[in-house]
Amino acid sequence: MKKNCAKGRIGENLAEEFLISKGVKIIEKNWRYSRQGELDIIATDKDTLVFIEVKARSSIKFGYPIEAIDKNKMNKIKTLAGIYLNENKDLKFKKLRFDAVAVILGEKPQINHYKDIYQF
């Protein structure tokens, strides 16, 4: 496994543990649609369906992890979320939200949860 992939998986695992500790219920991890891409975490937060992008970095030398979610990345997440919803029409939720979890790895990882990073 590539070094960045391993870092990403560690970040996703830390994000998952963090979200669960906050009462978020994980539905799926690493949901992939063909070559279109992947949704890191799909979850519910009470009556809200949440698509969560996880970004992990070993330091802030090249910027904060959240800065890696640009307009193109957000458009890809939105497209994949639409495909997921189309394939899972039986899901019951009142609200929809896009979140991000930024992880700075280290001896004591720093985890920040950004809610509602994209609004239609």
Image (spheres, helix red, strand yellow):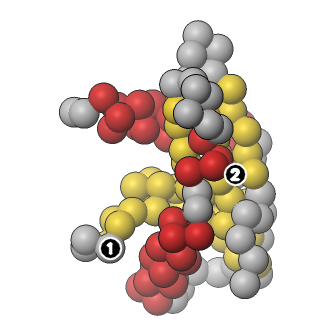
Label 2 Cα neighbours within 10 Å, binned few <14 / some 14-19 / many ≥20: some
Give the residue displayed 57% in from the left and 16% down from the top.
106
> How far across and how far down the image is residue 112, in percent?
73, 39
The answer to which quarter of the image holds residue 3 is top left
Q: Position of residue 67 (x, y in %)?
A: 63, 49
Taking the image as shown, residue 20 lies to the left or right of residue 13, namely: right
Q: Is residue 93 above or below residue 54?
A: below
Distance CA(mark 2)–CA(mark 1): 26 Å
* Nearer to the camera, 21 or 73: 73
Q: Is residue 17 visible?
A: no
Identify the mark at residue 27; answer none if there is no mark.
none
Circle 2: element type: loop
Q: Residues within 10 Å of mark 1 (few under 14, many from 20)?
A: few
Q: Position of residue 50 (x, y in %)?
A: 65, 65
Q: Disc count in the image?
A: 2
| Disc 1 residue type (three-letter) | Gln
Location of residue 36 by image quarter: bottom left
- Residue at label 1? 36
Amino acid type shown at disc 2: Val
Q: Secondary structure at mark 1?
A: loop
* Residue at 50% from the left image edge and 40% from the top image edge: 12
Determine the residue positioned at 25% across, 73% down.
Answer: 34
Q: Residue at x 61, y 28 (%)?
A: 60
Q: Is residue 64 above or below residue 66?
A: above
Residue located beneath label 2 in the image: 24
Residue ranking furthest to the top: 107
